[in-house]
Image (cartoon, rainbow, N blue to C red):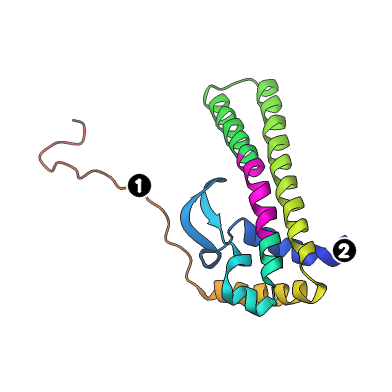
Amino acid sequence: MLKTLRPALIVAALLAVGISPAFTQPARSPFGPQPVPFAWWKNEQFKKELGLTADQSTRIDKIWETTLPELRQEWDELSRLEDKFSKLIQLDADEAALSRQIDRVETARSNASKTRSLMLVQMLKVMTPDQRSRFNALYGRWQQDLLKQPPPAPRTTPQPPRDQNKRPEE
């Protein structure tokens, strides 16, 4: 059964992590400085195209709401461990300490990914095989639309205006 879910799982994973502005809301994510995943199971057009029933949408939402606190906690832990790793690098820590911290970071990343993947499998199990197939086709169309969009502008930190009367060394 997992083999039949694999393509849909990959698609759902990409959607859930917010791969495109079309699937995200502009609010801050519980997963760090990335957009909030798009709640596709609540979107009327999406539900119509997939043929999702109100019960299916409710069940998928319950899976999301139940898993969200655990995901937040795991992503917060990952962020904390990544910050500590960055500080170790800045402090020029020895390789053994860096290696131990890398292990901690990767374990936390793996735990968060596993929780997210299991959540997505549970969501996909709510849908029929036909709905999963339509989901893949719908995602394919959206992905093509995404490729047609211009890439986002690079983020820059605004610089304060320079006082024209000061020399650069001041």
| Distance (Cα) linking label 1 and label 2 | 45 Å
Query: For residue 3, which numbered disc appears in the image?
Result: 2
Of labels 1 and 2, earlier in sequence is 2
Q: Residue furthest left?
A: 165
Relative to the observer, which residue lies in front, 157 or 96?
157
**Where, by quadrant of the figure, is residue 61 drawn?**
bottom right
Res. 144 image quadrant: bottom right
For the residue marked with disc 2, what is the amino acid? Lys
Q: Main secondary structure of the magenta part?
A: helix
Stretch of the chain drawn in magenta: 60-72
Residue tagged by mark 1?
Answer: 157
Q: Residues within 10 Å of mark 2 (few under 14, many from 20)?
A: few
Q: Sort mark 1 into few (<14), some (14-19) or many (20+) by Cα contacts within 10 Å.
A: few
**Considering depth in this image, is 44 or 158 the residue closer to the camera?**
44
Of the 4 image quadrants, the one containing the C terminus is top left
Question: Could you tell me which residue is drawn at 65 percent across and 38 percent down?
Answer: 74
> Residue 10 colored magenta?
no
Q: Position of residue 47 (x, y in %)?
A: 64, 74
Looking at the picture, does residue 21 appear above or below residue 149?
A: above
Identify whether 12 is placed above or below 51. Answer: above
Element class at badge 1: loop
